Amino acid sequence: MSFSALALALGLLVQTPGGPQVPPAQEPAQLEDVVVEGRRLRSVILDFVGEVAAPAGVRGPARWNGPVCIGVVNLRGEVAQYIVDRASDVARELGLTAGEPGCSPNVLIIAAADGRAVAGRIVEARRSAFRPGGSGMTRSLQALEEFRTSEAPVRWWHVSAPVDSETGHLATRLPGYDAPMTNVSAASRIRTDIRDDLLKAIIVVDVQKTAGVSLAQLADYCALVALAQVDPLADVASFETVLNVFSDPAVPGLTPWDMDYLRALYSVEQNSVGANARGAEIVDQMMRRARAAEAAPEAE
């Protein structure tokens, strides 16, 4: 099922008269400097990546490798456009191409007055959009149940796939289709011809539970969970991240820590063998960026 068809179905399911309201943008607050005491920086980064990353099954972290088209339904035009523009700007900063107006969304953000009810309806109505059936494409059935029943202000679901890095074709068999053929360019124990691509992201925003944050903060939050497979149950209270915005509205939006994670995710070699190898490369990238940021004031 295409995302445009899914969007139409969702519109019929969740449309409310006048649309839910999102609070107006506020001036972001300034965070105090975070001091890490008694722990090596690498250990802190390892903890963060370990908490946040939520790839499908035993696969490595997936990312977008083609244009990202953001769609928003059930919000006023100017509010929806702000979220689309902000998420698209973050995508461009990572080197991605953002879809032009009228593109078919592969990231769908649904605003709802009752997020849990809407999530339950769309999972029931379009279950195959959430679980296509191919190996290594989604998280577990338990994770889908958590998406459906969560009381969180924002919930999300990703569909990714192992693909042939040469052709971009799926490298996993879907129900009803023949097993795919993949290219093998060179035998290696450290490199593979298979990479993991994000294909779809579905994000449900419960607007009744977002009153404490600004539109700018909400847009940044959606941008992060649209562009990376983030664990909804991650314990990030000890980290400076936009993921804490609903418990700490002083978080201004995407933090340097968040952007370092995204830049690392979109910079690492995707053809290294093993999920652990790719996770270690993300940690190494974040380490280099953190050290560079520490050295910059001294150089000035």
Image (cartoon, grey):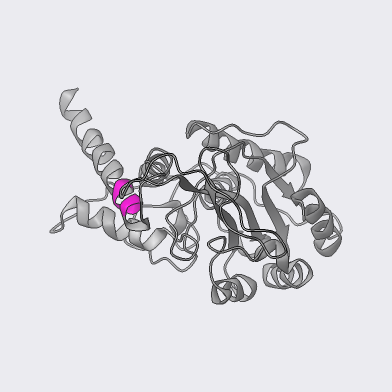
Q: Which quarter of the rendered picture does the N terminus lie within?
A: bottom right
Q: Where does the magenta region start and end?
A: 277-281
Q: What is the magenta segment's predominant secondary structure?
A: helix
The answer to whether residue 253 is seen in the rendering is no
Name the residue at 30% across, 46% down: 281
Q: Residue 229, position in %: x, y?
A: 49, 55
Q: Is residue 1 above or below residue 146?
A: above
Q: Could you tell me if residue 25 is visible in this image? A: yes
Q: Viewer-proximal residue, 180 or 55?
A: 180
Image position of 292 (left or right of 135): left
Q: Is residue 30 above or below residue 93?
A: below
Residue 268 image position (x, y, % from top left): 37, 41
Q: To which quarter of the image does residue 101 belong?
A: top right
Q: Nearer the viewer, residue 136 or 164?
A: 164
Farthest residue, direction top: 300
Left or right relative to 285: residue 176: right
Image location (x, y in percent) of residue 245: 47, 56
244 relative position to 207: left or right: left
* Residue 215 falls left or right of residue 190: right
Image-quadrant location for residue 92: top right
Residue 104 location, quadrant: top right
- Seen at 15% across and 54% down, the residue is 40
Q: Position of residue 130 (x, y in %)?
A: 66, 64
Q: Please, is residue 7 above or below residue 155 in the view?
A: above
